[in-house]
Image (cartoon, rainbow, N blue to C red):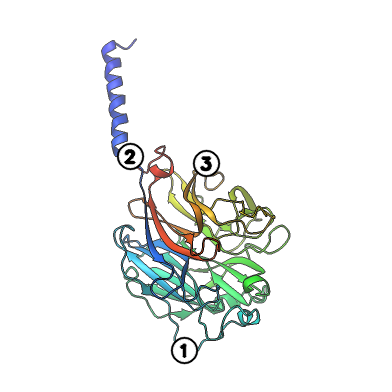
């Protein structure tokens, strides 16, 4: 039976109503930025190495390295943090969150290369993991030689006393005789089975900045942070894989863990590997053609998962050029154009890419607020307009999926 004109008219009205309803429920595109650490303020020459997480209760914790002189990674460095209880719109006072009592010794590899003064104390590479039980786990390093764990049960307002967990790293020594260790940086992850995973890199300390050569792996805990174990080497320093180091992680929809590694390989692309349990049996690392590698920290996080829709986010400086035009394979490119990418197929492809900061911009870390707003905590600007390591600001960008996709996708 053919539909009547009246029935067709009703169908058109219903369709129009549904379209209008969908438009009403979709949020307007949002992009806001707030600077929360500024070079030369509060007694520190530089603030670098940003990390950000959102607790179960929705509190946003943003942390970084506060460097007294800004001369190197081996400077007199403290770990500072700020809290936000309104999704990153406003921020509380700065807190110093890492302090190990007792005598401390400068890492000998830094002294051998004259990278620091013997009396400088370097706290470095803080990593946080929000736990499904409401706690927040924190790991940080001292002198790139010792690693400590502490925990907060009040959304980062207070912390337990640091407990040394360097013994987990010592288990790597028979296979790789490291002199330098580092967690993250950025954030770690908790798997659906409760396992805590922190990407790590290890170095012999004989090369540049005493950070090279290096390999990557993870440490993990199956008892909510009480004890930590080493994983297998995930990113070896061999063949076409040159000096893998700073790594981010995400759990894929099928349960596997994906590591996304920085390296100094000639491909100038991010290096990816997967494991069924996030600790052992890593797949052969592969370069991802769409994920450019200017040789800089990157970040990755899950935005949503089926049955709604699988969405992963990735951010780093999307750039392979240099102002001096000396683009040598495997060498540094200018740190600028930090951009956010979106994948709907668990990192196989990244069809959406949008700049957050077209100018100078470097390290970054992603988090997702309780309402689905995306948070990117990143380095931008240069104190002298030239040196990529002298970041002038640490900034939190707040944006939504509608902004990222120009209105083509929405969590609602």
The residue at which mark 3 appears reads as: 351
Q: Could you say which quadrant of the image residue 57 lies in?
A: bottom left
Numbered tag placed on residue 26 in the rendering:
2
Q: Label 2's element? A: loop
Q: Residue furthest right?
A: 239
Task: Tell me the CA gap for discs 3 and 2.
Answer: 21 Å
Q: According to the image, label 1 marks what residue? A: 102
Q: First in sequence, mark 3 or 1: give its number.
A: 1
How far from the left and from the top, in percent, is residue 43? 41, 76
Q: Residue at x 39, y 73 (%)?
A: 151
Q: Residues within 10 Å of mark 2 (few under 14, many from 20)?
A: some
391 left or right, relative to 14: right
Determine the image quadrant of residue 173: bottom right
Above or below, comparing residue 252 to residue 205 in the picture: above
Q: Can the viewer see residue 150 in this picture? A: yes
Q: Tag 2 or tag 1, which sits nearer the N-term?
A: 2
- Relative depth, front residue between 379 and 40: 40
Where is the N terminus found, in terms of image quarters? top left
Q: CA distance from mark 1 to mark 2?
A: 55 Å
């Amino acid at each position: 039976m053919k539909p009547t004109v009246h029935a067709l008219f009703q169908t058109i009205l219903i369709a129009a109503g549904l379209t209008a309803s969908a438009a009403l429920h979709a949020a307007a595109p949002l992009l806001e930025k707030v600077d929360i650490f500024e070079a030369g303020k509060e007694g520190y020459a530089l603030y670098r190495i940003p990390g950000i997480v959102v607790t179960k209760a929705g509190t946003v914790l943003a942390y970084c390295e506060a460097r007294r002189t800004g001369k190197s990674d081996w400077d007199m460095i403290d770990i500072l943090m700020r809290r936000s209880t309104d999704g990153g719109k406003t921020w509380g006072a700065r807190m110093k969150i890492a302090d190990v009592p007792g005598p401390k010794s400068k890492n000998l590899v830094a002294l051998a290369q004259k990278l620091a003064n013997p009396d400088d104390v370097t706290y470095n590479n803080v990593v946080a993991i929000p736990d499904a039980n409401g706690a927040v786990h924190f790991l940080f390093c001292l002198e790139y030689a010792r690693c400590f764990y502490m925990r907060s049960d009040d959304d980062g307002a207070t912390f337990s006393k640091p407990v040394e967990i360097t013994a987990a790293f010592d288990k790597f020594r028979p296979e790789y005789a490291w002199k330098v260790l580092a967690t993250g940086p950025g954030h770690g992850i908790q798997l659906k089975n409760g396992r805590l995973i922190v990407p790590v890199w290890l170095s012999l300390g004989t090369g540049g900045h005493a950070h090279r050569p290096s390999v990557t792996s993870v440490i993990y805990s199956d008892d909510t942070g009480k004890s930590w174990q080493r994983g297998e080497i995930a990113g070896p320093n061999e063949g076409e894989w040159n000096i893998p180091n700073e790594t981010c992680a995400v759990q894929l929809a099928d349960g596997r863990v994906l590591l996304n590694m920085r390296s100094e390989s000639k491909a100038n692309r991010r290096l990816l590997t997967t494991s069924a349990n996030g600790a052992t049996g890593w797949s052969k690392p592969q370069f991802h053609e769409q994920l450019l590698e200017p040789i800089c920290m990157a970040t990755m996080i899950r935005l949503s998962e089926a049955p709604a829709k699988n969405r992963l986010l990735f951010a780093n400086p999307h750039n392979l050029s240099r102002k001096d035009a000396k683009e040598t394979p495997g060498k540094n490119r200018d740190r600028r154009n930090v951009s956010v990418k979106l994948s709907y197929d668990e990192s196989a492809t990244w069809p959406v890419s949008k700049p957050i900061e077209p100018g100078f911009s470097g390290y970054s870390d992603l988090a997702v607020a309780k309402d689905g707003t995306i948070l990117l905590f990143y380095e931008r600007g240069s104190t002298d307009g030239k040196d990529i390591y002298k970041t002038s600001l640490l900034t939190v960008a707040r944006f939504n999926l509608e902004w990222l996709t120009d209105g083509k996708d929405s969590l609602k």
